[in-house]
Structures are given as structure tokens and as C-alpha cells.
Amino acid sequence: MKLLFVHPNLPGQYKLVAPGLAAAGFDVTAIGRYPIATSSLPGVTVHRYKGSPSRVDPRFPPLEAFANQIRQGRAAAALMTQLKDGGYEPDVIVGHPGWGDLIFARQIWPAARLISYMEFYYRDVGADYGFDPEFPVVDQDRQLLTLRNLAQIHAQHHSDLCIAPTRWQRSLFPAPMRRSIHVVHEGVDTRALKPKHKVRLRVPDRRLLTRATPVLTYSARNLEPYRGFHVFMRTLPDMQRDNPDLFTIIVGGDGVSYGRRPPNGNNWREAMLAEVGDRLDHDRIWFTGKLPYADYQRVLQLSAVHIYLTFPFVLSWSFIEAMACGCTIVGSQTGPVEEVIEDGVNGRLVPFFDREALRATVAELLADDAQRARLGAAARHHARRYYDVHDVTLPRYAEAVRAIAEGRPISRKPPPLAAPAAAAEAVAD
């Protein structure tokens, strides 16, 4: 069976799914906009289209955003047409419609089945927009939000199956769309991501960190308010004062994945250091930037307490990866996190803006080895049971692809809500 994955930022959500299905015997091809290393998608034939949308009317960004989706869809369609002219006919197309890449796919391959990844439905109330009063609502942004959903609405109309990674993300879609969306997370590799008691990591000042060191960790693709970086940094001076031995590792780049750059400063790291830097012990903080994956994994394995704060927005892979590594997590009481963490069972939850609750919860956990061990074991059990790519998510994807290709119905009931419980298991030395 021939599968075609479509995502401008390959491998995107299909980093594990596409190679996994290729290893399972599917003939897998992928197309994207940007060049990637061959090793990023082993077993997958990758093609790249070229597209550099020109600006339309910078005085009205909503129009520009929608026009760029159409341009990107046309650029992707040009490559699809080239593949079709060469004799390529996929049985199933799996793709992310958010950037417009799938808009014309059905016209090119009308017989192919289409599975669309419905990641996030933009709303001006009840999700990320307007959540933080520090970033006030702008009318022009409301207009932009209205148009950002058009490519997804188009995809839902033409798709044989729609997938959302979490229940909370599915819940954002209007009811008529929501009824057609199944919850299937792309998964993480919990066989590779696991606790390691004898882990060691040497930091730039040559200090050697082990599990005996109280290490506080924070991780995001980029350090920005959407992932609570501003709240975390404003709390860090108090957390350092509570524990003079605390060493903090902050993983993430200085770019912007979501939201805007700070009004004063090149990036949010510099902006927050300008705000609270005079109250920090910089010798006990390591800003790593973006790390090689093996080093990032060691950071999670070293963690005594891991902080994950987020606006009501898409759930980060790093959050599930931290759970797989057995981290003791303090997360924000926001919808995407509450779906996964039950307070006191497989992690702790605090209100997003409550810095005193964050400080007190971290202090409590650092002083209670037994609680940390129990919560970390339960977090890993939850990740293995509901997000493991080998045993859970990849089989769901494979079954969905086969069912759609064969015209069979698949269950429209979302997977059952987890009942987290600690489970004894060996960990790597």
C-alpha cells in the first residue's frame, strides 16, 4: 500500500509515524517544503517543493496569511502533479492542512483517501488568544484568526478521516467538525526515553551533575511566554533562594515558535534576564540553547523536578518525553496539561499565573524524595500506556490507514481516559 505524507516542515508530526509505517511494510513517500537529512525519515522517499510566497498587502495581514496558504498549496500541487505525471499514485495521503499544502491534493489524486491532521482550531475566546492579560487583544489578530482556520475547514470537507492528537485540541473545533475527528497522538519512543539512575552530565563550567544534585529543568523548542517562560523566570529567584544547592537547566532556542518577540529585547531570554537577572545566581543556571537529542535526554534523566507551563495551546512533545523519562512534573492547570496530568497522581498542577504556588510546589517536591519517586514512576507508566509509539500510537495509525484504504469504518470513540498508576519497572543504569 502506498502512503504519501505531506507536511511543509518535515518530518513534523510524522518523525516516528512515517518511518514506523515504512518498517511495517507500507510504501511510504513524503513531500515537504524545506530540505531535511535523509536520516530524519529512514525508509521514506522524500521530495521537496520550492515555494517562497511573495507578500500581498502588508497593511492587512489576514489577507496575506490566507493568500500564502493558497500559494503554498499551489507550490505543493506542482510537485504532486509532477509525481502523478511520473506514474505515482498514492492509496492514502496523510497530511497537515494548516499551511495550505493539501488544498489541491484531492484534485490531483481524486481516488486517493485523505487523512488530515487537525492540530489546532484558532479561537478568539477559550484558548490561547487573550489568555494572558500581559499580551492584550488586538482587533487585527481577531481577523487573522478567522482566516487561519480556512485551510482546515477545506481539508475537513474533503477528508476521509481527520485526526487530532489530544482530546483537548479536538474539543476546540466546532461541533460539526468535531464529530468527524478521531483522537490519535503521534506518540513518543518510550523504549529509548526512559529513566537512568546513573546518568551524568558535565556542564560548561566543568561541573559534573548526577542524580544526587537537585536539578530543576525547563524545556521548550523556544523560550517564550506561550510555554510560560516569563512565569518560570520570574519565579526562579525565589526557587533558588529556597534551595541553595539547586541547579537549573533551561533548554530551548531564542527564536519565536508562537506569539511575538518582546517589545524591548531581541528575544525572551534576554528580556527576562534584563527583568530578573540581578536577583539570580547565574552560576547555578545553564541556558543550553537547542541541544543534540542525546544530551536533551540526559537533561530529562537528571531532572529532580521538571517544569511544564503552557497557554491553552497544542501539547508539546517535550512534555510527554519528560513523562517517559520518569520526570517529576509540575505543570500548569491549563486544558492540554489537565488532560494528561492528574494532580498528586502522576504529577502536580499549579495555576499558570500563580508564582507562589509554583515556588511552594517545587520546594515541597525537592524536600520529598518519596513523593518525587512515586509521581515520576506514575508519569512514565502513563506515557508508556497511552503514548508509546511502538505499542500504542503506531498500531492506531496503521489500523486507521488500512481501514480508510479498504473502506472500512473505524471507531469514532476516542481512546479511554487513562487511569494513571505507578508500575514497577527496571531502569537503565
Image (tube, rainbow, N blue to C red):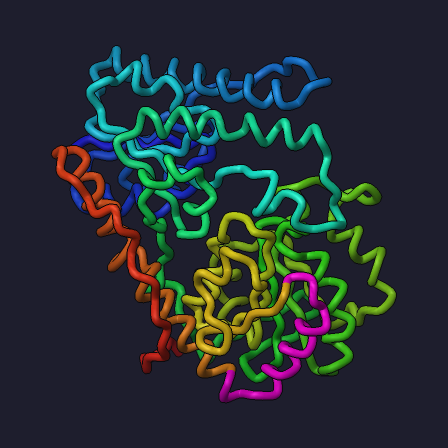
Which residue is depicted at the point 26% across and 15% down?
84
Residue 125 vs residue 97, the one in the foreground: 125
- Left or right: where does residue 228 sit relative to residue 176? right
Asked whether the viewer can see residue 39, the reply is no
The quarter of the picture where residue 237 lies is bottom right
Magenta residue check for 154: no
Nearest the eye: 379 or 336: 336
62 left or right of 108 in image: right
42 shown above or below 297: above
Q: Is residue 90 above or below residue 244?
A: above
In the picture, residue 10 is in which quadrant?
top left
Which span of residues is magenta-colored?
A: 352-371
Looking at the rendering, which quadrant does residue 220 occupy? bottom right
The quadrant of the picture occupied by the C terminus is bottom left
- Predominant SS along the magenta part: helix
One can see residue 111 in this view: yes
Seen at 41% across and 77% down, the residue is 377
Most distant residue in the right direction: 278
Q: Residue furthest front?
A: 175
Q: Residue at x 52, y 61 (%)?
A: 295
Which of these two is toward me, 149 or 48? 149
x, y percent for residue 129: 63, 43
Furthest residue in direction top, as rendered: 85
Q: Percent position (x, y) of residue 41?
A: 35, 41
Q: Is residue 362 magenta?
A: yes
